[in-house]
Amino acid sequence: MKFRFLVSALAELIAHAKAQPDHTMPWGYDKKAKKPGLLLVKDSGVYLMSNGIPCLLQDGTTGKPVPGNINKVVYAEGHTAETWIGGDDYVEFFDITTFEEAVAKRHTAIIFDVGPSHIRVLFETAGPSAADVRARIEKLLSDKSSIWCRPTPRHRKIVGYPATARSLVMARWPKAVILNDMPLEQAVKFYAEVTGERA
């Protein structure tokens, strides 16, 4: 099964785990090698929690969990406390560097692909926004020293050449589509269709 978490929802857990003086490790891990991280837990739902001690509580304070103010957790999408999932319960530790990498590389989501004998960590990254794509094309087309084209219908990218090589490009690829010859909005739409980025 795959369990998806938005990276933006994990900021408080990550900060807490890094800031605490002590850390808990699940059964089966070396207790002498304590280090900050998040715990992937499957019991009532599937969630992540900080392994920092003192614990991060639901009200944002730190301390010992008590009824009404237990550990703060972030549930996987679609797997809250009310969700029943078959199979054994478990707790797995993931080093804080896994989550720091997700933040540093601007991933939007982290996915745990859990199988009978493995857990793989996958990342999702959102493509550039429509405004980003438009700004990029506007910048490309404002540079009169270059031409930007799709050489053939099979190409899934836009390639740049010196403007002085235009006749050579057209001789080599007679079906080349040159963005510089299009109105801006048409060029943006064409670029998005070719590259798969949003327009």
Image (cartoon, rainbow, N blue to C red):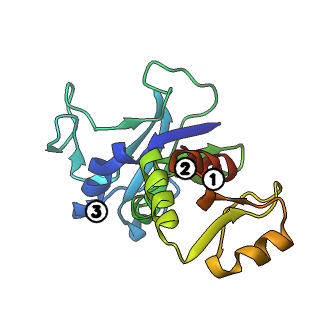
Q: Residues within 10 Å of mark 1 (few under 14, many from 20)?
A: few
Circle on res. 5: none
Name the amino acid, label 3: Lys
* Quarter of the image where the N terminus is located: top right
Disc ID at residue 18? 3
Instruction: Identify the secondary structure beneath mark 2.
Output: loop
- Residue 67 higher or lower than 89, as above or below: above
Q: Quadrant of the C terminus?
A: top right
Count of numbered labels shown in the rendering: 3
Answer whether residue 158 is visible to the viewer in this image: yes
> In the structure shown, which secondary structural element does the residue marked by tag 1 occupy?
strand
Identify the element where label 3 is drawn.
helix
Mark number, residue 120:
1
> Mark 2 sits on what residue?
183
Q: Which tag, 3 or 1, sits closer to the chain's start?
A: 3
Image coords of residue 42 (percent x, y) = 51, 35
Label pair 2/1, CB-CB below 8 angstroms: no
Front disc: 2 or 3: 2
